[in-house]
Image: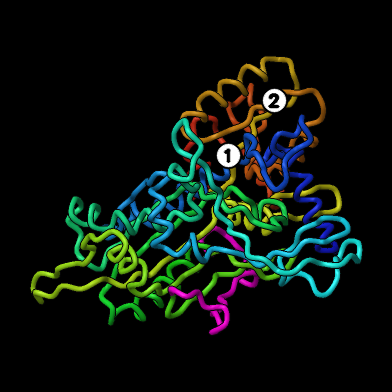
Amino acid sequence: MAKQGNNDKMGKIVSLCKRRGYVFPSSEIYGGIASCWDYGPLGVELKRNIKERWWKAMTLSRDDIEGLDCSIIMHPRVWEASGHVEGFTDPLVDCKKCKQRFREDEVKDKCPDCGGELTEVRRFNLMFKTHMGPVVEEANLVYLRPETAQGIYVNFSNVQATSRQKIPFGIAQIGKSFRNEITPGNFIFRTREFEQMEMQYFVRPEEAPEWLEKWKEERMKWYKELGIKEDNLRFHQHTEEELPHYAAKAYDVQYKFPFGWQELEGIHNRTDYDLKRHIQHSGKDLSYFETGSEERFVPYIIETSAGVDRTLLMCLVDAYDEEENRVVLRLSPRLAPYKAGIFPLVKRDGMPEVAREIAKELRSHFRVFYDDETGSVGRRYRRQDEAGTPYGITVDSQTLKDDTVTLRDRDDMSQIRVKIDDLVGKIGELIG
């Protein structure tokens, strides 16, 4: 791979995302809006593939985890109980000269942009506020959720009773969350609107340390199965200073981004903090009665909390490669938005008609891209290499004689001949 600076690499990835339809600046025709992004045709497919793999790993392939989809707007007392109203804040300073705002821990004595004097530190709550109903008044104040986890906690008894699950068991959810970050950035890594994949696993208190280790192992295994390079993944254990107030122990799965090692996913032993807070504030019983031992207790919670957007960015960064004559996005075939590109060698002699029939047949099995634009097939291959499409299918003069096509591999550019009738099975075998 060609040597490049870290900032240069991120710039190239951002450019590729716009050029190939992964990610666009939001509201671009109006000048955009800070740290808000729209996912294009390839971006939504990659996102969907990531979420489906997570959902399969966390729910469909297990009998001890149930799914849930909670409202984004919840009763405001949920956020009082969770501590978000009082404590979900960042230390904020302003530059008196250029008016830029910064987190206190990101600056020293002066403004890093203009050298101006900074204001005194004040606390800034990260939750977005809105009002429910036609009248804007304090009594109607609600919040856009800053995390999906609290919806799981308040539904603990509902899910347990209706699914008849016995502890240990989990509840999983994928959904949007919102945080009014002071300094978002690094493309889609830190944004004000983001999507989470969270699972909360309810266990006996004395078994929490064992389950924390099990879920650490499971979650790291999942990232490796996405095809992520092992050297770019690691665990970071929270120090006492870093440890969240609700956690007895906490780890991050970190990835080595061009801008440094950063958190992909948090894995926490949250103890019984959350359920007890909601018991206190709601007056409802969220304890669990265990038949056999005839014991009633408030479960401990092992949390796995991952970001969809960060996972997508990790996949793009890890897959990005440059060769002498091409840029290649070496996405795992299982994740790639398009599984194959289909090309007639020339736009005559019946080749486009055969290629379109192949595309029609494959679409009932895979997401594919048909390209009959003029220009060399090599150039069309390069476009799909950059988009991350793992296989190329070319209809040529030989096809018209024996119903075989050229099947090209994105990564090593090797080619084999395959019967048209065998394409579905062959591509399925290659994808795994």
Tag count in the figure?
Answer: 2
Instruction: Give the x, y percent position of residue 328.
Output: 74, 49
Residue at the disc numbered 1: 44
Amino acid carrying label 1: it is Val
Amino acid carrying label 2: it is Pro
The residues bearing labels 2 and 1 have C-alpha atoms spaced at a distance of 27 Å
Q: In front: 381, or 177? A: 177
Quadrant of the snapshot with the N terminus: bottom right
Q: In front: 253, or 63? A: 253
> Measuring 50% from the left and 26% from the top, which residue is drawn there?
361
> Which of the 4 quarters of the picture holds residue 230?
bottom right
> Measuring 58% from the left and 64% from the top, which residue is drawn there?
89
Instruction: Give the x, y percent position of residue 106.
Output: 75, 69
User: Does any portion of residue 430 appear in the rendered image?
Assistant: no
Residue at the disc numbered 2: 344
Queried whether the magenta region covers residue 58, the answer comes back as no
Nearer the observer: mark 2 or 1; the answer is 1
> Residue 205's mark?
none
Residue 46 sits above or below residue 27 on the image: below
Specify start and end residues of the magenta stretch as a single range: 224-246
Instruction: Give the x, y percent position of residue 279.
Output: 28, 64
Residue 387 sits above or below residue 158 on the image: above
